[in-house]
C-alpha cells in the first residue's frame, strides 16, 4: 500500500503538477483556429470557405490517444458558404472544445521524459490516471470535497445566475441522478471511464443520454473553475461515443383534432382559451414561456406580441408579428390582461383534452358535469390523456404555417428559431400536410357559447374507479 501511494505521489508530482508548458490547456480560447481560407478547387461548390484547427484524438474512454509517447492530434477542416459564416463559427468551435475539455497539448522534451518515467513505474494494467486518483483519495490536501458538496455549491451559483428556471431545474435533477449513483465519492476521484459507463447505462432515449452529458459537462467545467478538479471528467465525450440520436417523426394535431379541442374549450372552459391560442396560433413555447405569460404582451393595436427578456428561452426581448387574422379574432373574443394561465390549470387542461376526444356531444356534455378529479381518474380517460404529442401546440402551428406559405424562413421568424432551416424541419415541422390544409388551419374562427358547461357535482369514489358511463349516469 505504501509503495503504491509513493508511486501515486510520484505520478501526481511528475504529471499532474508539471510546469505550465506541458499541462493540458483547458481554456476554450487555446484552440488554435486558422482561416477562413478559400479553397480554389471548390469554386463551383456552395461551401468553399474553410477553417483549420487541431484537437487531441480521444479514445473510447474519453482519454487522449497516445502514439509513441505523444498525443495523437485530429485535424478538422469544416467548410462554409461564406467567409463571414466561417468567421462567425469560431466562437462556437472554441466553446465546444472548451466545454468538452479538449484543447492543445504542448509537451516539452523534459515533460515527455518525466511522463515516460512515470509510465515505466506502473504495474501492468494500472494507468497514470488510476495511480494519481489513488493518491488523491488517500492523501487529500485539506477538505475533501464530495460530489454532494460540489453539486450543492454549483447549484447555488447557477440559481443566482439564471434563477429558478427550466434550465436550472434540468441541471438540478440530472446532477442529482449522477450523485445518487456515486454517493459519498470525492469529486476529484471520478474518472472519465466511470462517467462513460454511467451515461451508457442510463435508461431512456439516446437524446436523454446526450442531454445528461451536456448538463454534467456544465457541472464539470464549474468544478475546474472552483479549483475542485484539474480536469472535467464529463468532458471529451463525443456524440459518436454515445448511442446515435435518431430523429423521430414530428407529431402534431390534425385539423379535426385542433378544431375539436378549441370547440371543447369554448363550450366547457372558455377561460382557458387565451392561454391556448397563444400557443396554437402564435407558436409561443409552452415549457419556457407560458407559465408567466401576461395578456398585456399581446398588442392588438399594433398586431404584435412582445415578450420580455426575462421569460424568453434565449434571454432576449422578442417581438412576434405577421400573425394570421384568425389569431386576432380569437384574441378579441377571449383575450384578457393579467396572467393567462388560470387557476388549477393542469387539471382543467386535462379535462378539455378528454372532453374534446369524446365523439358524441351529448356524452361529452354529461361528462362535463362531473368533478374534474373524478373524470381524469377513470380508466377510459387515461389513454385520452396520453394521446397528446410532446410540444404539440408549437409543432402544430409550425406544421400548418410552413404548409400554407411553403417557407420555413417565414415561420422561423415567428417561432424565433435561431437554428438552421433543416433543424426547424427536423424538430418542429410534421409531414404530409398540403398547402390547402395549411390555409384551412388559419381560417378556424371562434364560435362563443352563451353559457359554458361547468362541473356540477363532486362525488366521492370509493373502491374501484367508476367508468365514464356510470359517472355520466350519476351526473344525471
Image (cartoon, rainbow, N blue to C red):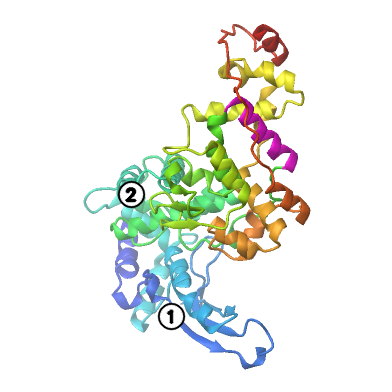
The residue that appears at 49% across and 65% down in the rendered structure is: 63
> Within 10 angstroms of label 2, few (less than 14), some, or many (20 or more) residues?
many
Is residue 379 in sight in this rendering?
no
**Nearest the eye: 147 or 414:** 414
The residue that appears at 42% across and 69% down in the rendered structure is: 119
Q: Which mark is residue 32?
A: 1
Is residue 389 in sight in this rendering?
yes
| Furthest residue toward bottom | 40
Q: Which residue is mark 2?
A: 154
**Nearest the eye: 470 or 60:** 470
Which corner quadrant holds the C terminus?
A: top right
Question: What's the magenta region?
Answer: 254-269
Look at the numbered disc 1 and give the secondary structure of its residue.
Answer: loop
Q: Main secondary structure of the magenta part?
A: helix
Return the disc, 1 or 2, that comes first in the chain's sequence: 1
Look at the numbered disc 2 and give the secondary structure of its residue.
Answer: helix
The residue that appears at 65% across and 35% down in the rendered structure is: 262
Q: Position of residue 120 (x, y in %)?
A: 42, 70
In the rendered image, residue 261 lying in the magenta stretch gets the answer yes
Amino acid at each position: 500500500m505504501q509503495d503504491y501511494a509513493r508511486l501515486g505521489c510520484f505520478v501526481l508530482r511528475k504529471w499532474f503538477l508539471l510546469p505550465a508548458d506541458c499541462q493540458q490547456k483547458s481554456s476554450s480560447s487555446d484552440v488554435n483556429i486558422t482561416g477562413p481560407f478559400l479553397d480554389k478547387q471548390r469554386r463551383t461548390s456552395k461551401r468553399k470557405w474553410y477553417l483549420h484547427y487541431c484537437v487531441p484524438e480521444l479514445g473510447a474512454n474519453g482519454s487522449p490517444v497516445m502514439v509513441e509517447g505523444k498525443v495523437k492530434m485530429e485535424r478538422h477542416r469544416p467548410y462554409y458558404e461564406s467567409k463571414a459564416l466561417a468567421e462567425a463559427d469560431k466562437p462556437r468551435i472554441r466553446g465546444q472544445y472548451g466545454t468538452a475539455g479538449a484543447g492543445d497539448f504542448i509537451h516539452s522534451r523534459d515533460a515527455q521524459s518525466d511522463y515516460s518515467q512515470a509510465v515505466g513505474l506502473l504495474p501492468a494494467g494500472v494507468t497514470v490516471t488510476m495511480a494519481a486518483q489513488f493518491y488523491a483519495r488517500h492523501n487529500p490536501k485539506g477538505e475533501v470535497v464530495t460530489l454532494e458538496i460540489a453539486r450543492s455549491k454549483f447549484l447555488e451559483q447557477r440559481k443566482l445566475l439564471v434563477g429558478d428556471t427550466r434550465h436550472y431545474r434540468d441541471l438540478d435533477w440530472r446532477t442529482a441522478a449522477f450523485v445518487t449513483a456515486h454517493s459519498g465519492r470525492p469529486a476529484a476521484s471520478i474518472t472519465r471511464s466511470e462517467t462513460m459507463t454511467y451515461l451508457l447505462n442510463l435508461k431512456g432515449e439516446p437524446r436523454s443520454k446526450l442531454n445528461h452529458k451536456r448538463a454534467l459537462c456544465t457541472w464539470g467545467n464549474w468544478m475546474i473553475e472552483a479549483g475542485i478538479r484539474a480536469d472535467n471528467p464529463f468532458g471529451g465525450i463525443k456524440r459518436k461515443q454515445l448511442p446515435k440520436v435518431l430523429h423521430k417523426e414530428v407529431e402534431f394535431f390534425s385539423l379535426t383534432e385542433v378544431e375539436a379541442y378549441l370547440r371543447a374549450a369554448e363550450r366547457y372552459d372558455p377561460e382557458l382559451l387565451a392561454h391556448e391560442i397563444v400557443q396554437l396560433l402564435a407558436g409561443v413555447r409552452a415549457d419556457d414561456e407560458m407559465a408567466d405569460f401576461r395578456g398585456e404582451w399581446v398588442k392588438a393595436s399594433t398586431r404584435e406580441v412582445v415578450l420580455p427578456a426575462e421569460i424568453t428561452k434565449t434571454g432576449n426581448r422578442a417581438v412576434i408579428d405577421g400573425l394570421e387574422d384568425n389569431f386576432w379574432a380569437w384574441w378579441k373574443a377571449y383575450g384578457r390582461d393579467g396572467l393567462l394561465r388560470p387557476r388549477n390549470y393542469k387539471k382543467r387542461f386535462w379535462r378539455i383534452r378528454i372532453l374534446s376526444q369524446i365523439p358524441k356531444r351529448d356524452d361529452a356534455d354529461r361528462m362535463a358535469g362531473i368533478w374534474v378529479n373524478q373524470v381524469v381518474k377513470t380508466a377510459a380517460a387515461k389513454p385520452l390523456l396520453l394521446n397528446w404529442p410532446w410540444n404539440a401546440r408549437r409543432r402544430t402551428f409550425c406544421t400548418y404555417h410552413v404548409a400554407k406559405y411553403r417557407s420555413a424562413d417565414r415561420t422561423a421568424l415567428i417561432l424565433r428559431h435561431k437554428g438552421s432551416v433543416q433543424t426547424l424541419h427536423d424538430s418542429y415541422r410534421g409531414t404530409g400536410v398540403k398547402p390547402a390544409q395549411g390555409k384551412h388551419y388559419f381560417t378556424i374562427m371562434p364560435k362563443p357559447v352563451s353559457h359554458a358547461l361547468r362541473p356540477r357535482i363532486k362525488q366521492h369514489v370509493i373502491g374501484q374507479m367508476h367508468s365514464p358511463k356510470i359517472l355520466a349516469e350519476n351526473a344525471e
